[in-house]
Structure formats: structure tokens, C-alpha cells
Image (cartoon, rainbow, N blue to C red):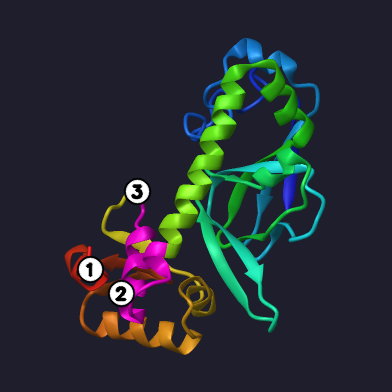
């Protein structure tokens, strides 16, 4: 984990003004005058794959905006197994429960090299009290997280294993390369889809044999979107 402090959240020495995900991130609705309410530093932190942004049960002291990379939210079950309940992509916010002073409900782990902005809870609360724009943005974030959870349950936890894998591949499509996706470990895939690691591996291998996936590099594939859509039932 590597980090540096953003002392001001708008001016030239900060990076918020030119941030590539600013229009979709937590501060997207704020105006320049709103940033005068910020009195604590916002930390820019780089997490390597496997590093935790926070752990379940930790005191909720900050929220994290994902600028680049991919983050998984993990719940651990009584038998020691894990279930990945959501993926966070650039522009998404992790740890919203911290705004309410609650403990973190999940463990958030980087799946790829991930750049985040760590925003102290006090900063978010001060902005929410001082500007209706921030309050509206927080409500939109809560609604978005509920919608993502519902979509996750609907698309990745129902149907046969092949359909679930196909839906995950479609979900992972790069926005800038509509027919390509980057996969991660089969254990993580299984934890997302509620199937065994062996089942996830077998289906990916089957898709490769059938030409639905064509390897472009380590864990990066060109996808037959139409075939995946038929399997996914979309």
C-alpha cells in the first residue's frame, strides 16, 4: 500500500479537479466553494492485488472512492468459506457505512492494482451538513449500492453455473474495449458465483475450447459477446 496526502481538494496542488473519475465519484456534484468545508487531508492510496482497504468489523473511519482498478467486497461464512458480494469499479464508493459511524460490513480487497481516495468520515459528514449537493450524492450512492446488490443476487446467484460464468464475463467487459475482459483467480470466481473453484475452472476451459474466449495475454480474453449472451440468457 502506498499513499500520499491531498492537502486541498480542488486547487492545483490537488488532483480532484483533474481526476478522471471525478464526474462519477463521490464529489461529482460539488462546486469549488464547497471544498472550503474540507479541513482534513484526503489521502490518495495505491493498493496492490490482495491488499485490504479495510476489514469487516473495523471501525468505519473513512470511505474510499475507487479511481482505478477493481475491488471485491467479501463476507466470511461460519464454515470459514468466503462469498464475494459485490465488485467495485472506478467511480464506485466503498465503506459508506462509515458515514453512519458503523463498523465496516465487509472486507474490501483489491483484485487488481487499485488507486483510491481515502476520505475521512468527518469530511463527508461536514460536507453533507454544509451543502445539499453532498447529501443528495450520498443518497444516490446508497441507492446505487442497493441496486448493485439486487443485480448481483439476480444475475450471479441464480441459474446454472455456465449461465453465471457467462454473466460475470459480460459484467467484466472493459468499458473501453467492449469485447475484452480481464479475469482473476478461479477461487475468486467461485466465491462470486456460489460454485466451486473446479467448476469455474472447467467452464472457463470449456469456453476457451469452444472459441467463446480467446486468450490475449495472462488472464485477458477476447469474448464472443453474442455467444455469452445466449448462454447467460440475456
Camera-side residue of 1 and 103 = 103
Residue 110 is situated, as x and y percent measured from the top left of the image, at: 61, 59
Vertical position of residue 217 compared to residue 152: above or below: below
The dot on residue 105 is none
Quadrant in the picture for residue 193: bottom left
- Give the structural element (helix, strand or loop) at label 1: loop
Are the two marked residues, 2 and 1, in contact with CB atoms closer than 8 angstroms? yes
Q: What stretch is highlighted in magenta?
A: 154-175
Q: In this view, does 33 lie to the left or right of 89?
A: right
> The C terminus appears in which quarter of the rendering?
bottom left
Residue 12 is situated, as x and y percent measured from the top left of the image, at: 64, 18
Task: Give the mark, 2 or 1, whose residue is nearer the N terminus.
Answer: 2
Q: For mark 1, what is the residue?
A: 233
The dot on residue 163 is 2
The residue that appears at 73% across and 17% down in the rendered structure is 37
Mark 3 or 2, closer to the camera: 2
Residue 233 is situated, as x and y percent measured from the top left of the image, at: 23, 68
The residue that appears at 64% across and 67% down in the rendered structure is 75
Q: Is residue 212 left or right of residue 187?
A: left
- Any magenta on residue 157? yes
User: Mark 3: few, some, or many residues within 10 Å (few <14, many ≥20)?
Assistant: few
Camera-side residue of 75 and 123 = 75
Q: In this view, does 189 lie to the left or right of 166?
A: right
> The N terminus appears in which quarter of the rendering?
bottom right
- Give the structural element (helix, strand or loop) at label 3: loop
- Give the structural element (helix, strand or loop) at label 2: helix
Residue 185 is situated, as x and y percent measured from the top left of the image, at: 51, 75
Q: Label 2 vs label 1: CA separation?
A: 7 Å
Residue 40 seen by the camera:
yes
Amino acid at each position: 500500500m502506498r499513499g500520499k496526502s491531498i492537502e486541498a481538494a480542488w486547487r492545483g496542488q490537488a488532483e480532484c479537479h483533474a481526476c478522471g473519475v471525478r464526474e462519477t465519484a463521490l464529489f461529482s456534484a460539488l462546486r469549488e466553494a464547497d471544498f472550503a468545508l474540507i479541513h482534513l487531508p484526503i489521502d490518495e492510496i495505491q493498493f496492490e492485488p490482495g491488499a485490504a482497504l479495510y476489514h469487516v468489523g473495523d471501525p468505519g473511519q473513512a470511505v474510499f472512492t475507487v479511481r482505478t482498478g477493481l475491488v471485491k467486497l467479501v463476507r466470511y461464512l461460519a464454515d470459514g468459506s468466503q462469498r464475494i458480494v459485490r465488485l467495485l469499479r472506478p467511480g464506485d464508493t466503498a465503506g459508506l457505512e462509515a458515514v453512519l459511524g458503523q463498523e465496516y460490513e465487509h472486507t474490501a480487497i483489491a483484485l487488481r492494482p487499485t488507486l483510491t481516495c481515502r476520505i475521512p468520515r468527518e469530511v463527508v459528514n461536514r460536507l453533507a451538513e454544509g451543502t445539499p449537493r453532498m447529501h443528495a450524492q450520498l443518497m444516490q450512492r446508497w441507492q446505487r449500492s442497493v441496486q448493485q446488490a439486487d443485480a448481483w443476487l439476480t444475475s450471479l446467484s441464480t441459474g446454472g453455473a455456465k449461465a453465471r460464468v457467462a454473466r460475470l464475463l459480460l459484467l467484466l467487459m472493459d468499458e473501453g474495449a467492449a469485447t475484452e475482459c480481464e479475469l482473476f483467480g478461479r477461487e475468486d470466481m467461485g466465491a462470486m458465483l456460489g460454485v466451486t473453484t473446479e467448476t469455474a475452472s472447467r467452464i472457463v476451459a470449456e469456453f476457451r475450447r469452444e472459441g467463446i474466449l480467446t486468450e490475449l495475454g495472462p488472464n485477458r480474453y477476447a469474448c464472443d459477446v453474442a455467444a455469452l449472451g445466449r448462454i447467460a440468457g440475456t
